Amino acid sequence: MPEPTIRTTGLTKTYFDRTVVNNLNLEVQAGEVFGLLGPNGAGKTTTILMLLGLTEPSAGRVEVLGMDPARHPLQVKARVGYLPDAVGFYEGLSGRQNLRYTARLNRIESDETEARIESVLADVGLVEVADRLAGVYSRGMRQRLGIADALLKKPGILILDEPTASIDPEGVAEILTLIRRLADDQGVTILLSSHLLHQVQAICDRVAIFVAGNVVAQGRTHELAAAGKGPEHLEVGVDADATSVRRVLGEVGSVVSVNPSRSQPRVWSVAVERGRTSEVVAKLVTAGLPVWMVKRTSDELDEVYRQYFHETEAKVS
Amino acid sequence: MSGDMPSKGNTVPSTRSRGRAGWQVVASKEFADHLLSARFTALIAILGLAAAGAVFAASGAIRSVAPVATGISALFLKLYTVAEDPIPFALLTFIGFLGPLLGIMFGFDAVNGERSQGTLPRLLAQPIHRDEVINGKFVGGLSVISIMLFALTVLVAGIGMFRLGLVPQPTEIARLLVWVVVSIVYVGFWLALATLISVIVRRAATSAIVTVAIWLGLALFGSFVFRAIASFISGTPNTGAEELAAAKLELFLTQLSPITLYEQASTALLDPEVRSVGVLTFEQIDRAIVSNLTLSQSMLIVWPHVVALVAFTVICFAAAYISFMRQEVRA
């Protein structure tokens, strides 16, 4: 399906004299996981609200499944599942009762409701706690209930605003696996926003990096990574003394710098030219030094992100 | 409408025409929430006890005069209008004063409660129109209020029948029903006002305080303030005509308060002997024969009051509606 399911053309939102989203052009293809990445306050949530027709654009066009959300809000909202930033539930109702309310608002037939609720609860792994009050749910459980809530209408598109924010690492991994599985198994198109690039980039097919209302980079994850400049940073664990490590690595032309790690003993922070990591490892091994760990500390995309982020910050200050 | 969009099996809601409208779903959820809430239990306990106490005292008083009061008509309705020690207010005054509390309790956090719980964006992302949220909330709240007021009236009637051994006449029942409807409109005004404040003010606690302040301000100082304004405008009347004009101005200004409107309307509805709520000159009451008005005549007297109460309610609700529609989802 080459036809994009979400397309924005010159999308702009201005509050008074402040431009929150500036001339945004996005295309999300059917079935892909698209990441809208950027620091807080970049305009991600505003963009999402415009996609759902909950906020009117100041200029530009939005098309969701071929419709303008501002003019056909109900048709769009019937097909798009939405997990808001910091999602909330009626705390006096159980998780299941909260879902029932959503089901009624979506006019799901009553004989079908319970089966659907059961199936989305199973999708997110909340079956056991479904009858507890939503008020006692942990942050991660609430987030998963929010995804279940968005899935209830069997959406073609799922829009997730900061799905991993303020959740413990284990919960993050669970949610990311769940999101990827939804895209792979159920063919749901997913647009997610996050300010935590390294958490979500692994599951995104494509990303747009969004800073201060402008998209600064957009494309496939690996394409963007290739666009990165500057050295890669490695953590190398070697059971050897500092002088021999420095001497051996000094012979490798692609190594930019070698410094002992601040946090761990017998670990060195090594900066190496992009794509030349293997030379470092090969040299250490042939020199007979016992290498027990090689870890990339900064991801390429992370680098890209940071680079753009700093550029914009520098411009602002 | 949906012909040109890609129909991907179950992503297109096959049940669009079936099921209840969005506002009905919202209203029934609000209704159920209110009925199960602690504030409902507290309110019904307070109102029930106070009403029972008031009617008990009133029925005692009526009983003591009943043997000599053969000529008194609509004796049953006196249950609602007579104040007697040890409880210094009639049920009617009591609803006039505490009715606002009902409306405020069910409306003060209608919208900002959803906001602070984080449920508003999720709710608005469902396939319903935005106004269905606020309409449904108002209908849900008003339904609970109607049930409470109706139950209270029936409770009082029941105690009255038991204590007095008196059965209400059909005309008395009709008057009571009209009065309940007017009471619902009155409490509905406070519900609309509370809803409006809940849209404007972001924190539920603040909106509760603001609404209660408006209520107490109007209830305790409203008539003083309006009277002061009236006398300021009129100055010192010298002639009879001026005095009449001053009195009419004062009446008009005090009627800007829904509390006054409601009390005047309910007095006229529940007491068939009340022939006017306005200014009467001596010429008008001189040699007037005391007689009872029919219900339709009483309604004619209070019709402007009812219209004004409905107008106040509509204005408040419209303001709440418009500001809710214009508000950003995220704020």
Image (spheres, grey):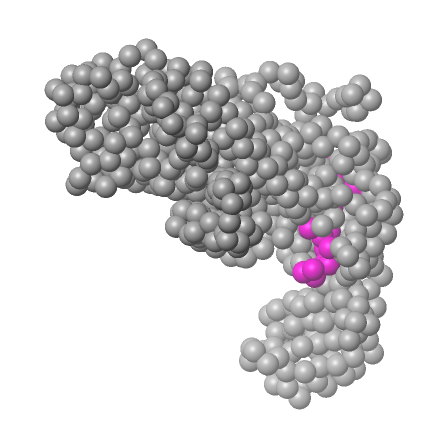
Residue B277 location, quadrant: top left
Residue at 45 percent across and 16 percent down: it is B296
Q: Nearer the viewer, residue B119 or A245?
A: B119
Depicted B212 relative to depicted B316: above or below: below
Residue B174 appears in the figure: yes
State the residue lying farthest toward the top.
B170
Residue at 29 percent across and 12 percent down: it is B169
- The image position of residue B222, as x and y in percent, is 45, 49
Position of residue A250 in the picture relative to residue A203 (left or right): right
State the residue lying farthest toward the bottom.
A243
Residue at 68 percent across and 43 percent down: it is B326
The magenta segment is: A25-45
Depicted B143 relative to depicted A109: above or below: below
- As for residue A28 lying within the magenta part, the answer is yes
Position of residue A279 in the picture relative to residue A109 (left or right): right
- As for residue A48 lying within the magenta part, the answer is no
Residue at 53 percent across and 47 percent down: it is B197
Q: Nearer the viewer, residue B192 or A201?
A: B192
- The image position of residue A192, as x and y in percent, is 68, 47
Depicted A232 relative to depicted A50: above or below: below
Q: Nearer the viewer, residue A113 or A306?
A: A113
